[in-house]
Amino acid sequence: MRRLLPDPVDDVDVVAAYAYPAQRPWLRGNMIASADGAATLDGHAGGLGNPTDQRILGLLRALSDVVIAGAGTVVTEGYGPARAREEYQTVRAEAGQPPAPVMAVVSNQLRLDFSARYFAEAKQRPIVVTCQAAPQDLLRAAREVADVVVAGARVVDPAAMVSALAERGFTRLLCEGGPSFLGSTVEAGVLDELCLTISPMLVGGPARRVLDGPVISPPAPMRLTQLLIDDDDLLYARYEVRR
């Protein structure tokens, strides 16, 4: 893995390259897209990446307190519980973190399979983020298997979610989408950083973009703070949202 920006380096310390800033809380998004802007290949994000991209994904999870994803992404990508990664245990211990991050799923309607391994096999209770309008029977079912955060009235309010997670001690936040929920974090003004892997392939077709949903008005300006490249020519960009 080589660094192109801010200064060229042939062998990058990726743990240092992706360290969270001192500012807390900090919401980092992580997505992948093809060179022509597709966020999925055959309906899944995984087909766009390679083993290095998966390693960076594992690192970003290992550096975080909580991994947040929308219900659609959790189901489509077949999410399971977080696992402790041996290679990052010292890093997490030095940061005062438990062996693995907590998983958090965002759902307005709570149309989730509460018997799925995401819940059933979790070593620590996941978090379900929902809204006040969620069906009460499903809310009770969620509380049986997860810690529930109610953030927002009719839909999840990303700003209220960030505040509620920070109050619980989760300040290094990683959002893995999907495109609709990630777009809502930008619209709410709470996304601090976007880690975007750019895959050197052209996909075409109707694939979703990294952000989906309403137009962000005015557009959220960003600053490129880091650019890495691997041996397969995948680019790993780190953008900070300008306030």
Image (cartoon, rainbow, N blue to C red):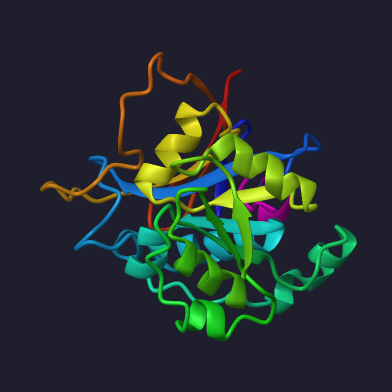
Give 224 or 66, whichever is nearer the viewer.
66
Number of labels in the image equals: 0
15 in the magenta segment: yes
In this view, 162 is above or below 224:
below
Residue 148, quarter of picture: bottom right
Outermost residue toward the left in this view:
205
Q: In this view, does 43 lie above or below 160?
A: below
Quadrant the C terminus occupies? top right
The x and y percentages for residue 167 are 78, 46
> Which residue is pictured at 36% across the width and 43% down the height?
180
Name the residue furthest top: 218
Q: In which quarter of the image is residue 23?
A: top right
Query: Which quadrant of the view contains residue 154?
Result: top left
Q: In this view, does 39 lie to the left or right of 66?
A: left
Report the span colored magenta. 9-17
User: 41 and 202: which one is in front?
Assistant: 41
Judging depth in this view, the residue of 172 and 184 nearest the camera is 184
Q: Is residue 41 magenta?
A: no
* Residue 58 appears anywhere in the view: yes
Quick one: 19 or 119, which is closer to the camera? 119
Query: If the image is split into quadrants, where does the N terminus sit?
Result: bottom right
Which residue is rendered at x = 86% and y = 67% of the image? 93
On the rendered structure, is 169 left or right of 227?
A: right
Percent coordinates x, y for residue 7 in the rendering = 63, 32
Q: Where is residue 204 in the image (x, y as percent from the top left)?
A: 13, 46
